[in-house]
Amino acid sequence: MYSPNRRQIASCSDDTTVRLWDAKSGAAARTLEGHTGAVYSVAYSPRGGQLASGSYDNTVRLWEAESGTLMHSLEGHTGAVYSVVYSPSGTQIASGSWDNTVRLWNPQTGECQILIQDSGTVKSLAWKEASGGEYLGIGSLDKSVCQWKVKREEEVTKAALCWSTGHKFLALRGASIEGVVGLSEINQRLLKQRVGMLANSDNEISIVWFSAGYDSEEDFSSLSSEERVDEIFCEEERVEYEE
């Protein structure tokens, strides 16, 4: 990974270290030590002052790029962290993990701002800025790709699902659904039903639905109550649905 000014390269390794190199001469600048497992991903902040690393030890670590000083160790994932990326503004970091989640962090305080639960191991992340806001792309081991719009409202971070492809199922928690495309007719009806139930409920909820394998309402309704996934589950974080 090149630094934004292209003068430095950061590499990560199974030997638990991150190494910084002079991009012109190839000389080793310094070795960043602290992880206790293989390091799978590194990313520079947009201005190059900070470096993030994701590891098999379930943590994200933030380093001062010039001195190599450890600034924060971000804990919360329960599986290896395979991908880290900064937002275009540099005000957030996204980390994707084996535990099927993406976490958004404040790089200055180390606080986890939001958790997005995906349907598979998260292997890749990409963040872009457009006229309509900032968008986070997620690639998972279940061969699915989805895009989320990340926004700040009254100092609160929210993530709204824009579209998703290829999921056998999709579990959403701590996020909102806003103009989602690519859902089956069954799932569109389920989503509308959940919106109505949310309006009449004080519970904090999560939704899980299938988006593949059930081509008709008859196929879906034939499932047993244990197999059906059109149920509401109480969770720690509220899922907000926006039309």
Image (spheres, rainbow, N blue to C red):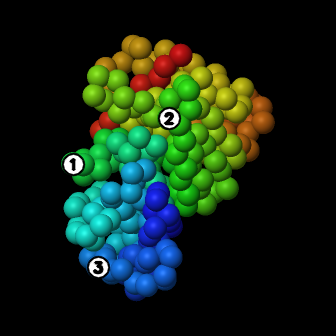
> What residue did someone put label 3 on?
33
Q: Earlier in the sequence, mark 1 or mark 2?
A: 1
**Image spot of residue 46 (x, y percent):** 42, 50
The 10 Å Cα crowd at callout 2, few under 14, some 14 to 19, many 20 or more, is: some
Question: Does residue 88 appear to the left or right of 153 in the view shown?
Answer: right
- Crowding at dot 3, Cα within 10 Å, few <14 / some 14-19 / many 20+, comes out as some
Whole-number angstrom distance, CA of label 1 to CA of label 3 = 21 Å
Q: Check residue 109 in the rendering and tell me which mark sits there, or answer none.
A: 1
Q: CA distance from mark 1 to mark 2?
A: 21 Å
Q: Position of residue 33 (x, y in %)?
A: 29, 79
Q: Amino acid at mark 2?
A: Glu
Mark-to-mark CA distance, 2 and 3: 32 Å
In this view of the protein, can residue 120 be seen by the observer?
no
Between 105 and 166, the one lying in front of the other is: 105
From the viewer's perspective, tell me whether residue 239 is left or right of residue 112: right
x, y percent for residue 128: 54, 41
Residue 4 in view (yes/no):
yes
Q: Are marks 1 and 3 in contact (CB under 8 Å)?
A: no
The answer to which quarter of the image holds residue 184 is top right
Three-letter residue code for mark 1? Thr
Mark 3 or mark 2, which is nearer the start of the sequence? 3
Labelled disc at residue 134: 2
